[in-house]
Amino acid sequence: MSYENVDLLDLDFHTDDPWEFYAWMQDDEPLFWDEINELWAVARYDDLVFVSRRTDIFCSGEGVIPKLGMDIWPDEAMINLDGKAHTCQRGLVSKGFSPRRIAEMEPRIREVCEQLIDRFEQKGHADLVKDFSRPMPFRIIADMLGYPEDKVDQVLDWTDTYVQGGSGPDAVTEEVVEAFADFTEFHEELLAEKKANPGEDLLSLWLKAELDGERLTEDKLVFEHSLLLVGGSETTRSAISMGMQALMEHPDQMAWLAERVDDEEAITAAIEEMIRYSCPFVRMRRTLTQDFEWHGKSLKKGDEILMLYPAANRDPRVFGEPHRFDVKRNPDRPSLSFGIGKHYCLGASLARLDTRLAVQALLRRLPDMKLADEPGVRARSSFVRSQTSLPVVFEPRVGRTPQPTTDEARCPMH
């Protein structure tokens, strides 16, 4: 079997059914050359680890979106930095993600989960994405950043639009550019407010953060703000909705987990399996800093290479029966959904906490939830793996009246 004219930036390629191609790459073509886009790609777990850790050979400083250089999209977030610049900026940003600050978010996350379920449990049906997994993590991020009450939904819409640009230059449409411009204007207004009235929110913390005499410039702040919205909400949404879909497709496992929803060991293993299986990111790009011989091929300085995370998460060399969803799985090595090495996702602990509390709330309140006859809808993207819709049904819960909260005014859903 061979594959010709494969376009790794095609919006439908990774959405439809890429698993046969990924397996072929892993077995027969571990270093694949995409002739259409003129870039390399790797799919084996160990190769992704190698690329991630050898930053001397594979750099991030030329950008992480394929065929979209820093000269075209000058994103100054830490994800696009190398060496000391990356270490310093990550150190500054990480001040808002200490274990203590993340742990303190747990009561608020639980509250948001309960409020959202209150709104649809009496109906007997819902769209799990639109009614739950889309708003839930974003509301937590909005709290962390100190958003005004009337802006949360609008910023979420902008984020959903401009994240599409991550699929490559052809995806950077006028709509994407306009959404990012609107977000930037909002960011500047919010930043001015935080300067005048600093609080305990993340933006206020970033404004005063200092490391070895360095501070985050305003140019960098807008990109770190944007990165947090994409990395902190878009991906958690996918882990929740696609993870719950996998559970509902395996009702025996869902029932088993619902009976052990408060068992820390069981729920932790299940969440890790959901994150492995769903794998919210399709890929990241690195750029060769030098000529390099690898897998019998010659890579040239300046070549781009993609790391295909969903493929690595189902590499049979690491995960037994990798396409089998198993909440009891306890692998020797972690999934690569959050990356590895210096660019390991800074918000991974928050994403895990969001996902765990969301799944626990759904299993406690709606353990009989099932997929509706109407199929879910996957997003067309070569950047993220996500759902735009996931209809579900369950027995209506009668007798529990949703309590109005100040949060409903802060973050209206309809």
Image: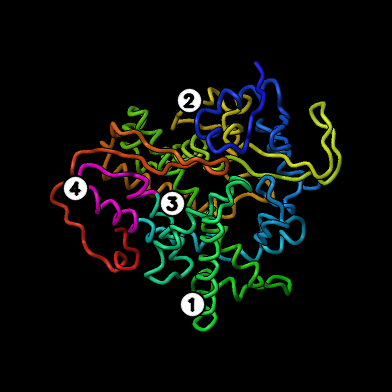
Q: CA distance from mark 3 to mark 2?
A: 24 Å
From what the image shows, is residue 208 above or below residue 230? below
Instruction: Kindly check if marks 2 and 1 are in contact, taking CB atoms under 8 A apart as contact.
Output: no
From what the image shows, is residue 148 above or below residue 322? below
Q: Amino acid at mark 4?
A: Gln
Q: Where are the magenta residues, as a range? A: 111-133
Q: Which mark is residue 324?
A: 2
Q: Nearer the viewer, residue 92 or 163?
A: 163
How many residues crowd mark 3 within 10 Å: few (<14), some (14–19), many (20+)?
many
Q: Quadrant of residue 262?
A: top left
Q: Secondary structure at mark 1?
A: loop
The residue pinned by badge 1 equals 199
Instruction: Point out the tag, 3 or 2, that comes first from the N-terminus.
Output: 2
Q: Residue at x 55, y 28 (%)?
A: 18
Q: Amino acid at mark 1?
A: Gly
The residue pinned by badge 3 equals 354
Q: Secondary structure at mark 2?
A: loop
Q: Nearer the viewer, residue 253 or 290?
A: 290
Q: Amino acid at mark 2?
A: Arg
Farthest-out residue, top? 1
